[in-house]
Image (cartoon, rainbow, N blue to C red):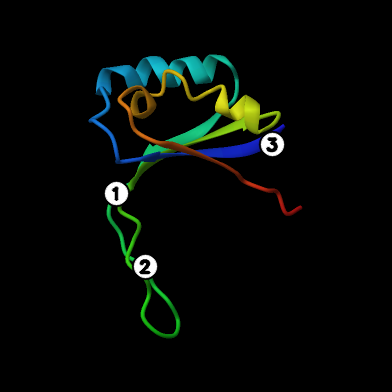
Amino acid sequence: MKDYILLMHADGAAANPDQWLTYLNGVRELGVFEGGSAIGGGETVRKDGVAVATTRHISGYIRVRAADLAAAKALVPGNPVFEAGGTVEIRELPRTD
């Protein structure tokens, strides 16, 4: 199993908050949920020079385990951001052990 992060973009209609519990419970029941959260404000820092602005279009994340990218993608239907017409970005989190 590999680790993936599903990044929710704030580019669609507002997600229905009532759908989150149903969606997250479904992912938990599959035994692949590894955590997640909304993403609030913050700042970027850099040792030298000017740091780029924070990324404001990412509104939250969910971390999951899946056999491959196709299996991670299969977890997206039902996601409230996706169902509201927004973007869910799927990225592998490679292990470095």
At a point 53% along the width and 23% down the height, the residue shown is 75
At a point 27% along the width and 18% down the height, the residue shown is 18
At a point 39% along the width and 72% down the height, the residue shown is 45
The amino acid sitting under disc 2 is: Thr
Q: Earlier in the sequence, mark 2 or mark 3?
A: 3
Residue 15 rendering spot, x and y as whole percentages: 27, 27
At a point 69% along the width and 31% down the height, the residue shown is 68
Give the CA distance from mark 2 to mark 3. 28 Å
Q: Quadrant of the N terminus?
A: top right
The total of numbered circles placed on residues is 3
The amino acid sitting under disc 1 is: Gly
Q: Secondary structure at mark 3?
A: strand
Residue 84 rendering spot, x and y as whole percentages: 30, 25
Specify whether 10 is left or right of 97: left
Specify whether 77 is left or right of 3: left
Disc sitting over residue 9 in the figure? none
Q: Quadrant of residue 32?
A: top right
Give the labeled residue for mark 1. 40
Crowding near the residue tagged with mark 1, few <14, some 14–19, many ≥20 C-alpha atoms within 10 Å: few
Give the labeled residue for mark 2. 44
